[in-house]
Image (cartoon, helix red, strand yellow):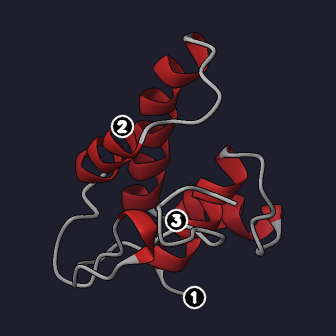
Amino acid sequence: MRCAQLRTALSARLDGEPAGVPDRRLDKHVARCAACREWLERAERLRGPLLADGAGEPSADWTAKLLARLGTEGPGAVGPGGVENGGAGEGRPGQGDDGRTR
């Protein structure tokens, strides 16, 4: 499984959604892969302010900024709404055309 696929699972896990990958496998990969470990740490830091303000769901603008800061805007990337940009990232499962999680 590629890092991008595991990052999608990690993102789902952070959001309290089913990751589709056993936690043990995710944790083992993060322990061995410095790039995914850094990605997860950044995602957790960026997620903190959202949780602190008590908002229900992030806006499309906030989501786009988060994905940009995580480096998913490049060739092969999947941006908000699951639209492929051509970068190394992956969109989250369960996203519809409006980019919001179902």
Look at 49% across and 47% down and name the residue there.
40
Q: Is residue 41 above or below residue 13?
A: above
Res 22 → quadrant: bottom right
Q: Nearer the viewer, residue 64 or 24?
A: 64
**Dot 2 lies on which element?**
helix
Calculate the distance from the C-alpha at mark 2 to the C-alpha at mark 1. 28 Å
Q: Nearer the viewer, mark 2 or mark 1?
A: 2
Q: Is residue 13 above or below residue 49?
A: below
Q: Nearer the viewer, residue 20 or 98?
A: 98
**Dot 3 lies on which element?**
helix
Q: Is residue 70 above or below residue 52?
A: below
Q: Nearer the viewer, residue 34 or 66?
A: 66
Res 87 → quadrant: bottom left
Q: Please, which residue is most extreme toward the front here?
A: 98
Residue 62's x, y, as percent? Answer: 36, 37
Residue 83's x, y, as percent? Answer: 35, 78
Look at 71% across and 53% down and name the residue there.
13
Q: Which residue is mark 3?
A: 7
Residue 55's x, y, as percent? Answer: 59, 21
The crowding category of the residue bearing disc 3, from other C-alpha atoms within 10 Å (few below 14, some 14 to 19, many at least 20), is: many
Q: Earlier in the sequence, mark 3 or mark 2?
A: 3
Q: Earlier in the sequence, mark 1 or mark 3?
A: 1
Q: Which residue is mark 2?
A: 62
